[in-house]
Image (cartoon, rainbow, N blue to C red):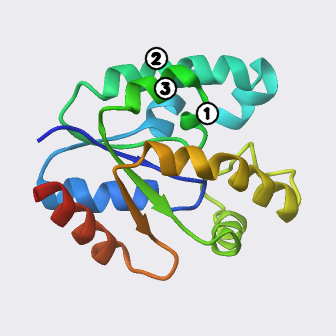
Amino acid sequence: MKSIILIGFMGAGKTTISKQVAEILDCQRVDMDDVLVERIGSISEYFEKYGEASFRQHETALLKEAVHQKSVIATGGGVIMQEENQKVLSDKMVVYLKADPEILIDRIRKDKENIRPNATHKKDSEIKNLFYAREKMYEKLARLTVDTSNRCPKEIAAEIIQHVAS
């Protein structure tokens, strides 16, 4: 098995689905946000103190490490914006977890556990604009697109595994 890399906007389900897929495949899981928190501390505090560009450098270094492991990787929502990361992902098994922007915003607002620096102080319209700015790149990099809007994690994981196995 090669790595399976989950991309998608905040709230699309990357963390949840990566747990399901890794459990079913009995393989390692890398949640890039969790690893980055271990390495640099709070992502939102890091953003405030050092800026997004510095954070993205750490993210790129981790992506380059993670793709060489046989694992299911949950990326951060903005990982696809760096040209260097696009090159890293270009020949990998990339799965785009897609959801309706209204559903994504609802999930983001209800999630009190994961504070997202690119959404915390933004209006819903600004979050939608960020989604639309990234959507084409998610679609371009994906070998598989799975809609997570109104589906349970087990169903989504099964679809991904079925595609990867074929």
Residue receiving disc 3: 85
Q: Position of residue 1 (x, y in %)?
A: 11, 42
At x 73%, y 66%, the residue is 109
Question: Mark 3 and 2 residues: CB-CB less than 8 Å, in contact?
Answer: no
Q: Observer-nearest residue: 39 or 163? A: 163
Give the alpha-carbon distance from disc 1 to disc 2, as whole Å.
Answer: 14 Å
In this rendering, the answer to whether 125 lies above or below 95 is: below
Quarter of the image with the C terminus is bottom left
Splitting the image into 4 quarters, where does residue 82 fall?
top right
User: Would residue 150 appear left or right of 41 to someone viewing this image?
Assistant: left
User: Would residue 94 appear left or right of 11 to someone viewing this image?
Assistant: left
Give the alpha-carbon distance from disc 3 to disc 2, as whole Å.
Answer: 9 Å
Splitting the image into 4 quarters, where does residue 144 fall?
bottom left
User: Would residue 26 appear left or right of 75 to someone viewing this image?
Assistant: left
At x 18%, y 55%, the residue is 164
Residue receiving disc 1: 81
In this rendering, the answer to whether 43 lies above or below 49 is: below
Which amino acid is tagged 2? Ala
Q: Nearer the viewer, mark 3 or mark 2?
A: 3
Question: Mark 3 and 1 residues: CB-CB less than 8 Å, in contact?
Answer: yes
Q: Which mark is residue 61?
A: 2
Determine crowd level at label 2: few under 14, some 14-19, many 20+ residues with C-alpha closer than 10 A. Answer: few
